[in-house]
Image: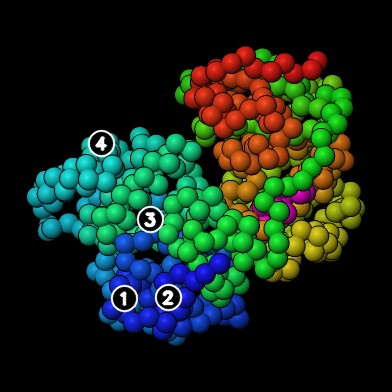
């Protein structure tokens, strides 16, 4: 593994062609040091990856570069010149643009209106819009960023909204683009298209910083990669001279299993049986269409599909919080007992009483109360359990003791049950939710996007816990947009498209191309037969 051009900024003079040089950047938030003496040198016209565990300091460092935070010490050079980046406007003036993981777009504005927002030529909008329309057409053609300038943002797919964010930065004449977890909400095809765009931008002389947890993306699209761990820069290497295994070890400081070992499944009796389940939402849109699915004890069934094809609605119905006003039909049985589709018996409390655990797709909106302490969130939904009760009152000491044990067993950092959920990194928030649900040993575990926005070390840990639960005899329904995750963890794969189950496959007998066809609504061959 050899160093990239300039492992530290002092190792080569600025004239060598660095777009960005960060020298001895440090930043603390109270007692927490997020960045410690960070050196980073990024050559012009390259794609530079930055990776690290959740909480490693990547986002803080990029927020300093984009002017959201000011460093406690250190200096920033852009194209060899020292600059003072005090806010995002000064970053933009320095030629820096940033595409955030959660887009900063006004949903009921058009593409064109979002492009010029904050960059108007004057009090009259018409000249600004006219100039922007022509420039947008040029940029779209040059960089494969075609998008309807008159479309409302709320009408665009996530992939097209991301194009708008990139166009915004280019319209403001950014030569340096920072992308934070850009593929977290994209389909595989959209991610591939994004990579083509990034390569085109690089070839035109733009410099790109890519923050991602996905080692496959680092290997596929970057020229160089820097690794952060616990607030420090631990390595900068040429991508072509490293490997996913080496990068994973640098990230976490130990060897990491990129593929979780698991014994063959030993399926038992059916736990979940779904027959003819259909759902029409309150707007009259049919979200689920005659879904049939069986999951047995001791097996993981992965549900693959492009986001928005009914997986979310299926999880919500099974978990007990389906959309109000929706029309449901069909049958759901757990351990042979029919579960109601509506009414008081169909809520989350009733589902938990039926031994259904649920790790929801959105941990912050559905899995945690962000202002609550960790000990409160690890009891959330189970606060009426006998072990948490003292007569008619909740036993807070029992909850705190239980949370302390879960935090230790699941390696939640920092190990502080009094800390509010919002103060943990995304990966550690996910561990809190997973610990709460898995340690109840449910007969059926619903897992939605278990490793979205989670670093490689936490991914390995969460995957191991899911497999261990399977081996204890639970039935697991895994929903993920990550095909690698589906293929690695699942004993059987079902694919959804447009609210239907398109087919089932065994991981060893299928390919990504085969699954991709099913995800697009194409049946390339007859599905496997599932034993009765």
Q: CA distance from mark 1 to mark 2?
A: 10 Å
The local secondary structure at tag 2 comes to: loop
Question: Whole-percent x and y of residue 124?
Answer: 10, 53
Residue drawn at the location 39% of the way across and 41% of the way down: 193
Question: How does the figure colour the protein chain or chains?
Answer: rainbow
Instruction: Give the mark nearer the N terminus: 4 vs 1.
Output: 1
Q: Earlier in the sequence, mark 4 or mark 3?
A: 3
**CB contact under 8 Å: marks 2 and 3:** no
Instruction: Select label 2 or label 4 by which is in front.
Output: 2
**To which residue does mark 2 refer?**
6
Picture layout, residue 494 above or below residue 10: above
> Do callouts 1 and 2 mark residues in contact (Cβ within 8 Å)?
yes
Q: As rendered, which of 18 and 340 lies closer to the eye? A: 18
Is 463 included in the stretch rendered in magenta? Answer: yes
Return the residue at label 4: 148
Q: Which residues are magenta?
A: 458-465
Q: Nearer the viewer, mark 4 or mark 1?
A: 1
Q: Residues within 10 Å of mark 2 (few under 14, many from 20)?
A: many
Residue in the image at 57% along x and 28% along y = 515
Secondary structure of the residue carrying tag 4 is loop
Counting from the top left corner in percent of width and height, residue 177 is at 34, 60
The residue where tag 1 is placed is: 16
- Toward the viewer: 266 or 122? 266
Count neighbours of disc 1 (C-alpha within 10 A) and say few if under 14, some if 14 to 19, many if 20 or more: few
Q: Which residue is mark 3?
A: 99
């Amino acid at each position: 593994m050899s160093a990239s051009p300039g492992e530290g900024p002092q190792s080569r003079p600025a004239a060598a062609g660095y777009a960005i040089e960060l020298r001895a950047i440090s930043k603390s938030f109270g007692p927490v040091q997020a960045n410690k003496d960070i050196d980073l040198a990024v050559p012009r016209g390259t794609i530079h990856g930055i990776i690290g565990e959740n909480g490693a300091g990547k986002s803080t460092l990029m927020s300093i570069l984009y002017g959201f935070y000011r460093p406690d010490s250190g200096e920033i050079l852009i194209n060899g010149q020292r600059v003072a980046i005090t806010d995002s406007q000064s970053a933009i003036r320095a030629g820096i643009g940033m595409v955030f993981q959660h887009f900063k777009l006004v949903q009921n504005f058009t593409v064109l209106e979002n492009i010029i927002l904050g960059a108007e030529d004057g009090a009259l909008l018409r000249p600004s819009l006219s100039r922007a329309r022509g420039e947008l057409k040029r940029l779209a053609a040059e960089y494969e960023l075609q998008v309807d300038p008159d479309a409302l943002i709320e009408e665009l797919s996530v992939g097209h909204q991301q194009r708008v964010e990139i166009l915004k930065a280019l319209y403001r004449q950014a030569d340096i683009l920072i992308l934070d977890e850009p593929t977290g909400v994209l389909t595989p095809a959209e991610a591939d298209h994004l990579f083509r765009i990034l390569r085109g931008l690089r070839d035109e002389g733009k410099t790109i910083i890519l923050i991602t947890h996905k080692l496959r993306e680092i290997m596929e699209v970057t020229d160089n990669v820097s690794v952060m761990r616990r607030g420090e820069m631990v390595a900068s290497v040429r991508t072509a001279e490293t490997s996913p295994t080496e990068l994973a070890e640098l990230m976490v400081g130990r060897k990491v299993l990129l593929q979780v070992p698991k014994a063959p499944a030993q399926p038992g009796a059916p736990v979940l049986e779904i027959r003819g389940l259909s759902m029409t939402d309150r707007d009259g849109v049919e979200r689920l269409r005659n879904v049939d699915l069986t999951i047995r004890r001791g097996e993981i069934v992965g549900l693959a599909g492009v986001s928005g094809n009914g997986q979310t609605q299926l999880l919500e119905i099974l978990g007990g919080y389906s959309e109000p006003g929706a029309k449901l039909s069909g049958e759901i049985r757990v351990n042979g007992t029919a579960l109601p589709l509506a009414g008081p018996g169909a809520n989350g409390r009733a589902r938990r009483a039926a031994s259904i655990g649920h790790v929801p797709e959105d941990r912050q909106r559905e899995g945690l109360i962000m202002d609550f302490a960790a000990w409160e969130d690890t009891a959330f939904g189970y606060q009426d359990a006998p072990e948490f009760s003292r007569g008619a009152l909740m036993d807070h000491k029992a909850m705190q003791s239980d949370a302390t044990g879960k935090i230790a067993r699941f390696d939640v950092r920092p190990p502080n049950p009094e800390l509010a959920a919002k103060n943990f990194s995304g990966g550690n928030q996910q561990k809190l939710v997973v610990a709460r649900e898995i340690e109840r040993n449910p007969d059926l575990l619903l897992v939605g996007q278990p490793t979205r926005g989670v670093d490689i070390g936490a991914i390995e840990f969460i995957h191991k816990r899911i497999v261990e639960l399977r081996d204890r005899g639970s039935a697991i329904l895994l929903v993920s947009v990550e095909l690698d995750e589906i293929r690695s963890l699942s004993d059987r794969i079902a694919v959804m498209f447009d609210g239907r189950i398109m087919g089932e496959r065994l991981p060893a007998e299928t390919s990504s191309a085969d699954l991709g066809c099913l995800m697009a609504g194409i049946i390339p061959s007859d599905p496997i037969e599932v034993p009765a």
